[in-house]
Structure formats: C-alpha cells, structure tokens
Amino acid sequence: MWYMNLGEFSGLFYLLAIGIMIWSLIVQGKLNRLVKKYSQVPAASGKDANTCVREMLASNEVYGVTIDHIPGEMTDNFNPKEEKINLSDTTYGKNSITAIAVAAHECGHACQAYSGMFLYKIRQAVAPVAGLTSKFSVWIAIIGVVIMYASRSLALNNMGYWICTLGIVLYSVVFVFYLVTLPIERDASRRGLKAMKELGWVSSDQYGAAKKVLWAAGDTYAVALASSALTLLRLLLMRGNRRR
Ligand SMILES: [Zn+2]
C-alpha cells in the first residue's frame, strides 16, 4: 500500500518539521507585531468594538447575540451555545484598529452560525470529539508501534498494527478539525472586513491594516493545519515501517 513507501520520505519529514517550526515563529512574531502596532491606532470613525459588533449583527439580521467582557488579551471568541460574543481586555469597549478587527472577526463567526454555514456545522460537531482524541490518539498509535516493534509473534505484531491504526484514525479527527477550521477562520475575517468597509468604521488605509492583522491571525491556523498534517504523516510513517 502507499503508506508502506513513506519511509523513503523520512528525511523530507524532518525538513518539513523544521520548516513548520520556523514558519510558526515567523507567523507568531508578525501577528504580535501587528496586533501591538494597531492597538495604538484609533479607528477613524471613533466607534468602539462593542458598537461595531452591534452594527454588524444588525446589518446581518442576527438577533439575540449578546456581548460580554472576558479577561485576558486576545481571548476573544464567539460562544454559539450561549449566543455570546466574548470580547477580551484589549477589545471590549476599545476603539483601536486591532480591537475593531478582532470584534468584527468574532462577529463573523456569529454570522456563520446564524446563516447555517455547512463547514461551521461540521466544526461544531467535530470539535468535542477532536478535543478528546487530541489528548490520547498519538499515544495509542505509539503504544501500537511499540507492541509491533517488541513483538516476536505475528499475532502480536498484527495486534500492534491495528492498535496503531486505531490511534491514526482517532488522530484523523483532529486533522479534520484543523482542515475545516482554516477556511472557517478566513471566512469570518472576510465577513468582518466586509462590514468594516461597508459600515465605514475605518479609513481605507486602516482597512488595509485591519486586513493585515486578521490575515496574520488566520495564518496561525494554517500553521496548525500543516503541523497536524505532518503529525498524521509521522504516525503513518511509524506504522508503515514496522509491519512484518
Ligand atoms: Zn475565529
């Protein structure tokens, strides 16, 4: 089968792992820099993040979603169960470009939920399972490989192989979660940026700045996806190399 030949790519695997690590540092550094820079710049309209959220919800005909203040920096999120947009210390009541961009992005998630976006529904279904399997799936796969490696009988070797396969299948849920998350995050930013432009919260220069912030934030999800794809590849490599 195809995965039996993956062993030939182990050199390439390590190169990719290092590449993703460097990419992750670059993305995080860029995001931190942009967030900090545009936290100091007030939006041209003078409106604060809370006002913008209310305007965006109304213009998308999303009703019943409330705004709440949560502690921390950049801990902003949309909670679909509580129908709440949680804004962090750096966003709640603030009128910086960063604050408005982040609030508009979270509002984008509320709009996704209310418009019944297909990918969003998938993520909501997959998220609790992925949260669970992300904790132990890799360990199951490794235990399977150890059994395969240590076993002297064909039966034990087979058992290890299938335990490892179970771990890989469980980890696939995590991979699917990241796979659907990236387009969802990009879409939420697109929705937020559209509102920023149409509702005139920022000047055209500031719009460009907000776009940079949101795109840099989205890149962190691209890194997460690449990293989880590599973990999946790694597990397949480990299993493929050991079967007798
Ligand atoms: Zn988001």
Image (cartoon, rainbow, N blue to C red):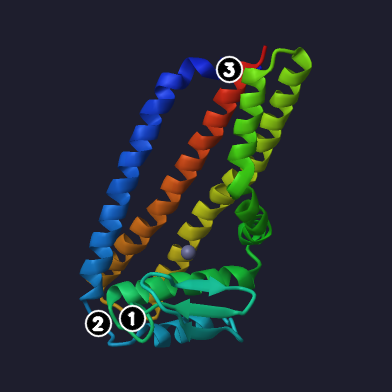
The residue carrying mark 3 is 241
Q: Which amino acid does the dot numbered 2 rest on?
A: Ala
The numbered dot on residue 81 is: none
Residue 148 point in image, percent of width and height? 66, 21
Residue situated in front as seen by the camera: 199 or 22: 22
Q: Is residue 202 left or right of residue 145?
A: left
User: Which element is circle 3 on?
Assistant: helix
User: Which element is circle 1 on?
Assistant: loop
Q: Is residue 41 left or right of residue 90?
A: left
Q: Which amino acid does the dot numbered 1 rest on?
A: Trp
The residue carrying mark 2 is 44
Residue situated in front as seen by the camera: 25 or 225: 25
Give residue 5's quadrant in the image: top right
User: Which element is circle 2 on?
Assistant: loop
How dense is the environment of label 1, judged by Cα within 10 Å: few (below 14), some, or many (20 and up)? Answer: many
Residue 86 point in image, percent of width and height? 48, 78
Give residue 88's quadrant in the image: bottom left
- The residue located at (44%, 72%) in the rendering is 76
Does label 1 or label 2 sit earlier along the sequence? 2
The residue carrying mark 1 is 201
Q: Is residue 66 left or right of residue 124?
A: left
